[in-house]
Image: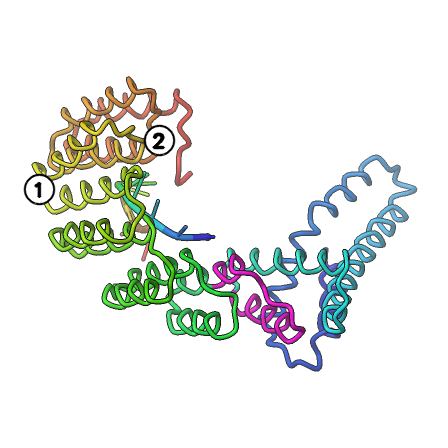
DNA sequence: CCCGTACCAA
């Protein structure tokens, strides 16, 4: 493994030397590329098990050789991809290299290694290869999740300025980012910006805002806003299970069981097919108002409609029962959970 | 890639 890292380092350093790359960005790229090689390396090692002691050393060298060659090939392809893009060649290899770059960028973003991924982006753009919207959304998502809203905002302006054009998911991601740092006003700004840029907000956009307002306890505002939006923008007539679940949850957490139930009943009347999450919300709602018995009723209803409770359901119930000191019942629920194969967390 | 739920803190 070490050899791969050394070899990879050397070559990436060669590629980047004249660009003055950040060391930590480098490290991240190495790790991500390394992960992608890992499976193959594992395979190589498992073959060595069959060797006799005599041949062991030789086998090890073979393995190392394979690993080195493998890394070299990858890096060569990467480098060639970049330079070919630069001179404008467009062929299969170019496509392959683009795909590879984008795959690395997305992996880096998901791991939160944004410095490295943004460096790769810059590198591609210098070579007149622009990552697509989807890849940009990965960047943006990474920035928003780590609270780097300044950079996120910058990225979106870049997109507006030199492409690729932001789509609905782009704006939704940015909105969510602002909501995460508790800046709902900015999220609302983004919402209007989006509409002005000719991108129609969708159900997800509405849900992000409704959820943010509920969290602030502004339930009336949430509902008003929702109505307003639904009248104009969002695709109507689609299932709004998620929106209703958000509002129901908001009312439960606000202590307004009556309003919360109103949303549930409304869904029932409309014939909405509930899902595990909506059941979890109502079960949690009654548990937190010390009505575990009512929760059980919804639990059995859940089973009847063919839904399988998950970790959320059980954690909710177990926690409520513990708080009431009902140890026997807690154990019972726990054993049911184990038997049903619900994955335990925290172990 | 973008929307909703629980547990808790050595």
Residue, x 28% and y 17% (percent of image)?
A: A304
Residue, x 25% and y 43% (percent of image)?
A: A243
Marks 2 and 1 sit apart, C-alpha to C-alpha, by 25 Å
Q: Quadrant of residue A107?
A: bottom right
Eyeballing the image, is A25 above or below A230?
A: below
Q: What residue would you read off at disc 2?
A: A310
Q: Chain of mark 2?
A: A
Q: What residue would you read off at disc 1?
A: A256
Residue, x 37% and y 69% (percent of image)?
A: A149
Mark 2, secondary structure of its residue: loop
Q: Residue furthest top?
A: A304
| Same chain letter for marks 2 and 1 | yes
Q: Quadrant of residue A184?
A: bottom left
On the image, the x and y values in percent for residue A43 come to 75, 41
In depth, the one of A38 and A187 nearer the eye is A187
A340 with respect to A179 (left or right)? right
Which stretch is magenta?
A114-139
Q: Quadrant of the C terminus of chain A?
A: top left
How many marks the image carries: the answer is 2
Eyeballing the image, is A137 above or below A149?
A: above
Residue, x 87% and y 44% (percent of image)?
A: A56
Q: Is residue A3 visible?
A: no
Q: Chain of mark 1?
A: A
In depth, the one of A145 and A40 nearer the eye is A145
**Residue A117 is covered by the magenta coloring:** yes
**Residue A76 is covered by the magenta coloring:** no
On the image, the x and y values in percent for residue A179 come to 28, 61
């Amino acid at each position: 493994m070490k050899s791969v890292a050394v070899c990879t380092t050397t070559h990436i350093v060669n590629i980047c030397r004249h660009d003055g790359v950040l060391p930590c960005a480098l490290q991240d790229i190495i790790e991500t590329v390394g992960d992608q090689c890992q499976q193959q390396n594992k395979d190589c090692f498992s073959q060595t098990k069959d060797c006799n002691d005599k041949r062991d050393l030789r086998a090890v060298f073979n393995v190392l050789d394979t690993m080195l060659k493998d890394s070299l090939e990858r890096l060569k392809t990467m480098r060639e991809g970049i330079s070919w893009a630069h001179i404008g060649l467009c062929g299969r290899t170019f496509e392959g290299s683009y795909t590879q770059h984008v795959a690395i960028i997305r992996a880096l973003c998901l791991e939160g290694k944004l410095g490295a991924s943004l460096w790769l982006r810059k590198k591609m753009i210098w070579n007149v290869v622009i990552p697509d919207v989807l890849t940009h959304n990965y960047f943006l998502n990474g920035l928003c999740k780590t609270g780097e809203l300044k950079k996120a905002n910058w990225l979106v302006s870049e997109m507006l300025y030199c492409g690729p054009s932001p789509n609905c998911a782009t704006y939704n991601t940015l909105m969510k980012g602002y909501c995460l740092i508790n800046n709902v006003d900015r999220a609302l700004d983004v919402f209007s910006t989006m509409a002005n840029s000719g991108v129609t907000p969708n159900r997800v956009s509405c849900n992000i805002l409704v959820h943010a307002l509920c969290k602030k306890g502004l339930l009336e505002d949430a509902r008003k806003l929702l109505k307003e939006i639904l009248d104009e923008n969002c695709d109507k007539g689609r299932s709004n299970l998620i929106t209703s679940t958000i509002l129901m949850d908001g009312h439960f957490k606000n202590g307004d069981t009556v309003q919360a139930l109103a949303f549930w009943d409304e869904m029932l009347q409309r014939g909405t097919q509930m899902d595990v999450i909506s059941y979890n919300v109502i079960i949690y709602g009654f548990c937190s108002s010390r009505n575990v018995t009512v929760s059980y009723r919804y639990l059995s209803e859940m089973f009847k409609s063919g839904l399988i409770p998950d970790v959320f359901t059980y954690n909710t119930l177990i926690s409520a029962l513990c708080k009431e000191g009902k140890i026997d019942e807690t154990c019972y629920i726990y054993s049911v959970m184990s038997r049903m194969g619900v994955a335990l967390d925290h172990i």
